[in-house]
Amino acid sequence: MSSGSSAGAAVNEGRLFRGIRWRLVGWNLLVLGVILACLGLGVFMLTAHRLRTEGDNLLRTRAEVLRRSVTLLINRRDDPPGVLPLLTNIPAEGLFYLVVDRKGRVLANPQGVKLGTLPNMEAVAALGTGKSDLRTVNLEGGQAVRLYTVPLGQARDARFYLQVGRSLAAEQRAESLLALVLLGGGLAGLGLAAGGSYFLAGRALVPIRRAFRRQQEFVADASHELRTPLTLIRANAEVLARHPEQTIGHNAELVGDIVTETVHLGQLVSDLLTLARADAGQTVLSQESVALDQVVQDVGRRFVPLTEARGQTLEVLADQPCTVRGDPNRLHQLIVILLDNAVKHGHADGHIRAALEPVRGQARLTVSDDGPGIDPEHLPHLFERFYRVDPARSREGGGTGLGLSIARWIVRAHRGRIQATSTPGLGTTFTVTVPLVRS
């Protein structure tokens, strides 16, 4: 891939993830804003209702005290209108009250309230359906008050009525302050949440961006790996097409190359399909009791002719019973991959060792070679798809670069672990641990 195309891909990737990041921030703020709005509205309504209820209860209590005092004073004299001026001696404790008659005349206004809309005769008329009336009214200038009206005597026969009121200014100021605090707190919270969401969205996108890059690299590598055998097949086929008069015998080498590349291409496609199905969770593994020691011995026996052809010696140590639960075919494939890797990367005339033993409830398999080894910086990437320590030898031995990725998937699917250790110049060892079946 050229530097220009790499830079363009990086720019497009940056734009894509910036857009996703801001969309995540936007959705987080929208959801949080709705939650804060609902909570703030609930707190405001609950607090306002509580203030109004407590204020009304206080108004009723004090109004009843005033009513008893006024009624007692009136009942002690034969001339009730003559005693009304004495009502100024009754403390109101932050309230105001009026005494009115049936015609709406104010007989007493101890606090000197500007009447305006008072007295409220609608409240007096409403006493026919109840023993008291409580409502909100507005005085001159728009001041809101809660007005409590009770008869001085029996409701039907009462000649005088008591209207007690309290200002709602304090409650309105408290509600305004509460609304301001909730609004300011909500906006401040959204501001802080915006910064936090931006940071967290960036952190959340890190593994996604890493996976996206791996996917891009995987697609690029897969395209390259597929293009190489196809190019060779096409080139050989074109040579054959230019000489139709020649027999297959004359071009046996070309035909053999086509067959070889076709086999390699088929293996590559098969490996890609295996990994794709594994990623999609579409691969179903059987769960059987597998004698892993017998599988290791069987695979080792089949590899003997291959190692002898390369002048290598193969030592298989799997004498102790190791029964695991899993898919016998996939476990067989796992051992084939590890031994094939050891044969390809071990020295000619070298020594390969496969050992299986039970260790603390685990079946531990080690496959070692005495090849050139692997530098430490390459070890963390060995199980990545299409990763090769030496790209110049990428097609040596017909490998697809997916074997160790498939091996890691098989091990993980069997609830096991796989790791590689290597010393440059001394060889490489792959260690696999899989849970044993409890007897």
Image: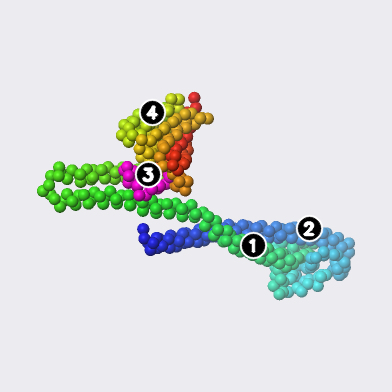
Magenta-tinted stretch: 382-403
Find out whether the residues at labels 1 and 2 contact each other: C-beta distance under 8 Å.
Answer: no
Residue 315 screen position, x and y as percent: 40, 30
Find out whether the residues at labels 2 and 3 contact each other: C-beta distance under 8 Å.
Answer: no
Labels 3 and 4: the sequence-earlier one: 4
Residue at (71, 64) in percent of width and height? 174
Q: Secondary structure at mark 3?
A: loop
Residue 434 screen position, x and y as percent: 47, 34
Labels 4 and 2: the sequence-earlier one: 2
Residue at (84, 63) in percent of width and height? 70
- Mark drawn on residue 185: 1
User: Nearer the viewer's eye, disc 3 or disc 4?
Assistant: 4
Q: Is residue 237 visible?
A: yes
- Give the Cα separation between the discs numbered 1 and 2: 36 Å
Q: Is residue 330 visible?
A: no
Q: Secondary structure at mark 4?
A: helix
Q: How is the image coloured?
A: rainbow
Q: Residue under label 3, please give it.
A: 402
Q: Relative to 250, is 346 on the left or the right?
A: right
Mark 2 neighbour density, 10 Å: few (under 14) some (14–19) many (20 or more) = few
Q: Residue under label 2, please give it.
A: 61
Residue at (51, 30) in percent of width and height? 359
- Mark drawn on residue 338: none
Labels 1 and 4: the sequence-earlier one: 1
Mark 4 neighbour density, 10 Å: few (under 14) some (14–19) many (20 or more) = some
User: Nearer the viewer's eye, disc 4 or disc 2?
Assistant: 4
- Give the Cα separation between the discs numbered 4 and 2: 96 Å
Q: Tell me the kind of residue under disc 3.
A: Leu
- Give the Cα separation between the discs numbered 3 and 1: 55 Å
Q: Residue under label 4, please give it.
A: 297
Q: Secondary structure at mark 1?
A: helix
